[in-house]
Image: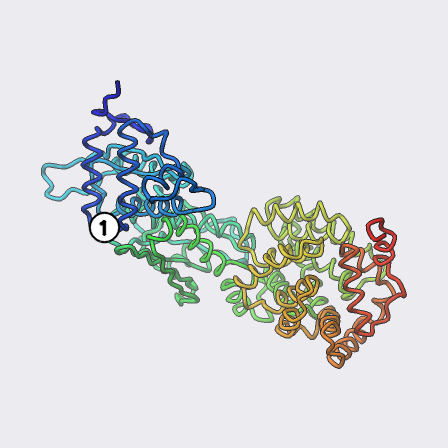
Amino acid sequence: MHDDSDIAVGGPPNAQSPPSADGVRAQVERLLASPDFDVPARARKFLRYIIEETLAGRADRIKGYSVGLEVFGRDPDFDAQSDPVVRIEAGRLRRALERYYLSAGLSDPVVITIPKGAYVPHFAVQTPLPMDPSAPAAQPVADATGLVPSARPWLLGLGIGAAAMAAALAGFAQWGRPFGGEQPVYQRSASLPPGGATLIVMPFVDLGEPPAAKIYADGLTEEVLSQLARFKEITVLGRETSRSLPPDADAVRIHRDLGVRYVLEGSVRAASNRLRVTSRLLDAGMGTVLWSRSYDDDMRVRDLLTIQDSVARQVATAVAQPYGIIHRADETRTGSRAPDDLEAYHCTLRFYAYRAGLSEEGHADTRTCLEWAVARHPGYATAWAMLSILYLDEDRFAFNPRTGAAAPSQRALDAARRAIRLDPENVRALQALMMALFFAQQPAEALAIGERALALNPNDTELLGEFGSRVGLAGDWKRGSELLEQALARNPGHSGFYSGTLALHAYMQRNYARARILIRQAGQEKFPLYHLVASVIHAQLGSQSEAAEARDRFLQMRPTLFEHWDEEIAKRNFRPEDAAHLAEGARKAGFPLPARTAAEAALQASPSQH
């Protein structure tokens, strides 16, 4: 016989006794009476139903189908897979409970949660805060783990994993000894690269009233650090150094004592159901603000960890991505004639300037600069990776090819592999190896490397654009376009490259009208292949004068390409049907193609064509 006077259903391990059925029911009434538990009537009915079914020992009956019938009045032929009402309301209820326990429910005796992926509630006792009789208003006291005891069970119940928990709780530790004084508590790092971009992340400050929001501010600091660490072109000081700094530390003093060039700081404010995160980047040497942005979110729509991840990614991408805030600030700072200790780093900045314009003149200067940089610093993985891409451009774009040297494709592979040996998780090195393998006609291996690089840093727009191009050329034009669209959305300042490549993707998907819009947006007149793509697009749309103008510009810049058409197509790994489609447009534009290309011959010989 079931006795519901003492219920333990799910929940994290807890040394305390589980809440009683009466305690759970009292908590439900407390929830429903609170103005901070803001949900519609059917969500309240949903909550009562799953609570009572669980307390009655019928938790195994709480399925999408039964909830649809008994809570939402669906017909017996209700299909929980095609009708998402239960999933939607469960998500809304789950978020409402999370918000409540971060504000009004901080001291409630019982915590009710609904784990993701199920509808059965979990119950846990929330330990009252220890009180000091001599203090009229004691504050929460952290235990040896750094966690306020009452917070532990309900945070686990909200589904926060061990890694996220560690990040969220790190801020409860003391930030370290007082900042400043005759002997600072930190020292300049001996390993900071000379002239390179160096950054420290200040602890995000909690400006809100709910005490639990402090956990979010600390967790956000940790997540921003993790996201920034993915960008190898900058050096981010470690967590321990960041934690040693109080929130009001002076940027100029940090620059003097630590030698860092940039300081990222931010704040978090929670009020009602709104959350605002403000972040800004400072030039530490000058104490000036280079960039500032606010992010607003609604905690009724998205849970806190989702918001935290989204904001951290946006901050890291804006600040550290290629062509981003730090890159542009460093480019301005170094100018065209960098001091001796910045010259090697300046070569990597020139790489991004070259990539933005893709001109033969920029290629020659950047290649020379990077070759000097790796000769001076042979352990500089990023410079080797960039040099690999410059070598590859000798081959694929016919930019400044060298006579008497090893083949550019082999030099590109050698430089990329050297970069990988120096730093196996350097995204720029992985990008270079992906590109070199792709043009060595090893597309499967290349795309596998690209997937690995994307997993390491999905925020890197330079990688996104190049990987999207490779994915499209290998035949998946739809996914390639999606990756390029992501890069364009995150980095509109580099829109020329993305728009030009997207124009080719649209052409291959036979969306010629969109392709024309995109190629006109690209504006890469110094880049030969821009004119080839423009010409075939105009030709397919019947715009013969525009097609002829672009054709003539291309032939002036690359007069011999059509003598090696099949070779050029093969090294880019076009599928035969895609290569034939490109040849069709090129013939309409009046280019001197062979009478029958290798791709067209292969298609005609294919059994599927007969």
- The residue most toward the right is 595
Residue 38 in the image, given as x and y percentages of width and height: 26, 51
Image quadrant for the N terminus?
top left
Looking at this view, is 390 or 550 the one in front?
Answer: 550
Q: Amino acid at mark 1?
A: Asp
Residue 211 in the image, given as x and y percentages of width and height: 25, 47
Q: In the rendered image, is residue 279 in sight?
A: yes
Residue at 56 percent of width and 47 percent of height? 456
Look at mark 1 in the image and give the residue it sits on.
36
Disc count in the image? Answer: 1
Residue 544 in the image, given as x and y percentages of width and height: 76, 79
Looking at this view, is 43 or 280 the one in front?
Answer: 43
Looking at this view, is 577 or 55 the one in front?
Answer: 55
Quarter of the rendering containing residue 364: bottom right
In the image, residue 588 above or below residue 93: below
Q: In the rendered image, is residue 177 in sight?
A: no
Residue 480 in the image, given as x and y percentages of width and height: 64, 56
- The residue most toward the front is 76
Q: How is the image coloured?
A: rainbow
Helix, strand or loop for disc 1: loop
- The residue most toward the bottom is 545
Q: Residues within 10 Å of mark 1 (few under 14, many from 20)?
A: some
Q: Is residue 123 left or right of residue 262?
A: left
Q: Is residue 287 left or right of residue 489?
A: left
Looking at this view, is 117 or 410 the one in front?
Answer: 117
- The residue most toward the top is 1
In the image, residue 262 above or below residue 165: below
